[in-house]
Amino acid sequence: MFDVHVHAAPDVMDRIGYDDQICAEYAAAGFSGFVLKGHQESTVGRARALARASGLDVVGGIALNRPAGGINPSSVAATLQSGGRVIWFPTADAHTQEAAGLPRLSDLQPRLNRSTLSTPPVLAATEQQLDDIALVLDLIAEFDAVLCTGHLSGDECRWLFEQARSRNITRFLLTHPSYTVPAMGISEIADFAAQGAYVEITAYQLWHQPEMTNALLAEVARAAGDKLILASDAGQPTSPQPPRALRELIETLAGLGLDRSWLEASASDNPRELVLS
């Protein structure tokens, strides 16, 4: 299996283990690798070190939040030039995060500005911002990297998808679209998948999304079809160890009658094709 979404320490939030401890959990569980995600910094250096030490396919990237430079072509270029494979649009600094009351760095440091980042057309953007977004997308296309929607709204995800397709970006992942943000409906998710977008469901949603039910997650999986990606999004002290979290997600969905071989492929073949092929 290959997990495209996991968090580890060091981080501004408490995590269940440090990089090496999480990597050891994946190795012991027989995983081929994982994508290390941080909301506040590039994880490329950490991932490359883990890959060299463990022999697993450990992949890094960057989430375009303010501490990592925001929607900043220089940050993206440095990430991709140094071997990063995954670019997430804003997560903790997305306006949806603030509106939903989800965690932000400014919760820990009240002196920080609580302003947020956004992608057109939901909020007005300056010409410079549009130019920066265009260059970020051009860089992703040039390096054939993975573009993830982060915590953007549904309208922003649609706009970003259209921009990505116009640049022939083929590795496009809707970051947990049925999560609290962006809270997409089943028909909208199915439409994205039909047009070639990958759709992520995370084990985190099983335990930490109050409005989510297992039956609804199964509907999302069906809507995604052969574009389904199952990931853990684990690393929180209140979640199981990431490899076990992902296996529990598979067991939960299989228990609702979904085909186990398809679910297992969605946690192995599909994510490897998305990130590494």
Image (cartoon, rainbow, N blue to C red):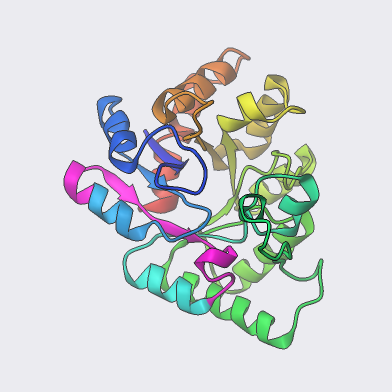
Read off the magenta span.
51-72
Residue 65: image x %, image y %?
58, 63
* Residue 31 visible in the current orientation: no
Q: Is residue 66 magenta?
A: yes
Residue 33, picture quadrant: top left
Q: Indicate yes or no whether the magenta region holds residue 105.
A: no
Image position of 167 (left or right of 209): left
- State whether residue 99 is above or below residue 114: above
Q: Residue at x 36, y 33 (%)?
A: 1
Is 148 in front, or is 52?
A: 52
Q: Nearer the viewer, residue 187 or 80?
A: 80
Residue visible at 67% across and 65% down? 160
Would residue 37 be seen by someone viewing this image from the given angle?
yes
- Can you say whether 69 is above or below 223 in the image? below
Q: Position of residue 223 (x, y in %)?
A: 68, 36
Tell me what residue is drawn at x 30 percent, y 25 percent.
29
Q: How many marks?
A: 0
> Position of 45 compared to 7: left or right?
left
Left or right for 66, reference 125: left
Q: Picture coordinates of residue 25 (x, y %)? A: 31, 29
Residue 48: percent from left, percent from top: 27, 55
Residue at 32%, 52% in the rendered image:
47
Q: Nearer the viewer, residue 166 or 142?
A: 142
Q: Compared to 91, does 101 lie above or below?
A: above
